[in-house]
Amino acid sequence: MAISSEAQFVTFSLGEEIFAVPVEVVREILDHEEAFKIPHGPDYLLGLRDVRGQGVPVIDLRLRLGLSRTVKTPHTRILVLDVPLEQRMLALGLVADRVYEVVPFQQSQIEPAPDIGIRWKSDYIAGVVRRDGGFVVIVDLARLFSDSGTALAGVVASQRVA
């Protein structure tokens, strides 16, 4: 993931952990609604949601990262993202416990992913930023969803950009 001297990120939480995605991939942020279930999908695929006339797969990012299932609260949101993958654009919704703000991070603030001591595979981490006495994990969305298996790939196969 190429990051210029400063980049804007949307921050959100999964439990006590703070994550971030580049602002340019975030299409919109929606209130949580139950998704239309897809039979035989991976456990983290909650189903499809209609977003402005497009069927968008909704992912429980907690499950995709090996954490416990999301428990819906009044703060639960869905980040609708357009993730560039190989030769197509993947539209998907990520369930977040809470969405916070858009923040700028300097490239010099972004540290490489640690190799040990974390609860998720480090190859999905684009970087880590120290902030407010804790850390913000920048998620590499292309890596996270490029190897997610044929079940998700089949659901989103029709989402191609001309």
Image (tube, helix red, strand yellow):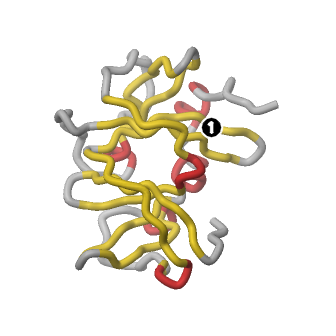
Q: Say which quadrant the N terminus sits in.
A: bottom right
Q: Residue at x 42, y 23 (%)?
A: 47
Callout 1: 10 Å neighbours few (<14), some, many (20+)?
many
Residue 18's quadrant in the figure? bottom left
151 versus 106 height, above or below? above
Image spot of residue 42 (x, y percent): 42, 33
Q: Residue at x 68, y 24 (%)?
A: 158
Q: Secondary structure at mark 1?
A: strand
Image spot of residue 41 (x, y percent): 44, 27
Single out the residue that lies furthest toward the bottom.
108
Q: Residue at x 37, y 52 (%)?
A: 65
Image spot of residue 40 (x, y percent): 43, 22
Instruction: Classify residue 81 as left or right of residue 87.
Output: left
| Disc 1 residue type (three-letter) | Leu
Q: Residue at x 62, y 70 (%)?
A: 3
Instruction: Classify residue 91 as left or right of residue 159.
Output: left
**Number of marks in picture:** 1
Instruction: Classify residue 128 as left or right of residue 73.
Output: right
Q: Which residue is mark 1?
A: 90
83 versus 78 height, above or below? below
9 versus 113 height, above or below? above
Q: Say which quadrant the C terminus sits in.
A: top right
Q: Which of the two residues, 77 or 6, is positioned nearer the viewer here?
A: 6
Q: Which of the two residues, 60 or 77, is positioned nearer the viewer here?
A: 77
Q: Which of the two residues, 107 or 90, is positioned nearer the viewer here?
A: 107
Single out the residue that lies furthest toward the right.
162
Image spot of residue 150 (x, y percent): 58, 34
Q: Which of the two residues, 90 or 29, is positioned nearer the viewer here?
A: 29
